[in-house]
Amino acid sequence: MEFVNRIEIKGVVGRAEIHAFNGTRVCNFSVVTEYSTRDKDGNPDIDIAWFNVSAWQGPSMPDFYEIQKGAWIKVVGRIRIRKYTTQDNEERSVMDVLARTVELIPREEERLQPQRDW
């Protein structure tokens, strides 16, 4: 059996920050996605999800300065769960996406719609 940890996200960039780490640039940004379903009464219901993404400089990455708030984007990568302890000694965990490839979606193709379950 093969283990698989893969995620693909298409959505809109929320915030974006560029940092340098040991001489390599990393871009941390958020992506929002929507998924449409119907509730028990048959009314449309939209599920909104935010993802935190880290992309390291490399050949499969666009120029990080093009990743700006409001841009449509496609990210393929893997999920990483980080655990930490707060100042109040509470254990917390955070899910991040480590990007393998990042693709900016051209303005002409921005007519993306939420996924529909109906």
Image (cartoon, helix red, strand yellow):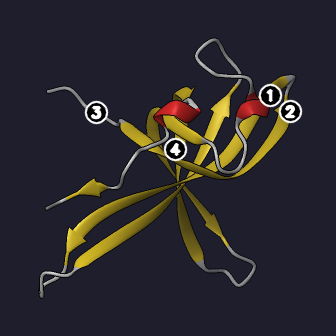
The residue that mark 3 highlights is 4
Question: What distance separates the C-alpha of mark 3 from that of mark 2?
Answer: 30 Å
Q: What kind of residue is marked 2?
A: Ala
State which tag comes first along the sequence, 1 or 4: 1
Which of the pair 113/67 is nearer the observer?
A: 113
Q: Is 44 placed above or below 105 here?
A: below
Q: Residue at x 64, y 33 (%)?
A: 55
The residue that mark 2 highlights is 20
Q: Is 37 placed above or below 43 here?
A: above
Indicate which disc residue 69 carries.
Answer: none
Which of the pair 52/14 is nearer the observer?
A: 14
Counting from the top left corner in percent of width and height, residue 23 is at: 87, 22
Q: What kind of residue is marked 4?
A: Val
In this rendering, the label closer to the viewer, 3 or 4? 4
Left or right: where 87 falls relative to 90: right
Question: What distance separates the C-alpha of mark 1 from that of mark 4?
Answer: 17 Å
Counting from the top left corner in percent of width and height, residue 61 is at: 63, 21
State which tag comes first along the sequence, 4 or 2: 2
The residue that mark 1 highlights is 25
Which of the pair 2/67 is nearer the observer?
A: 67
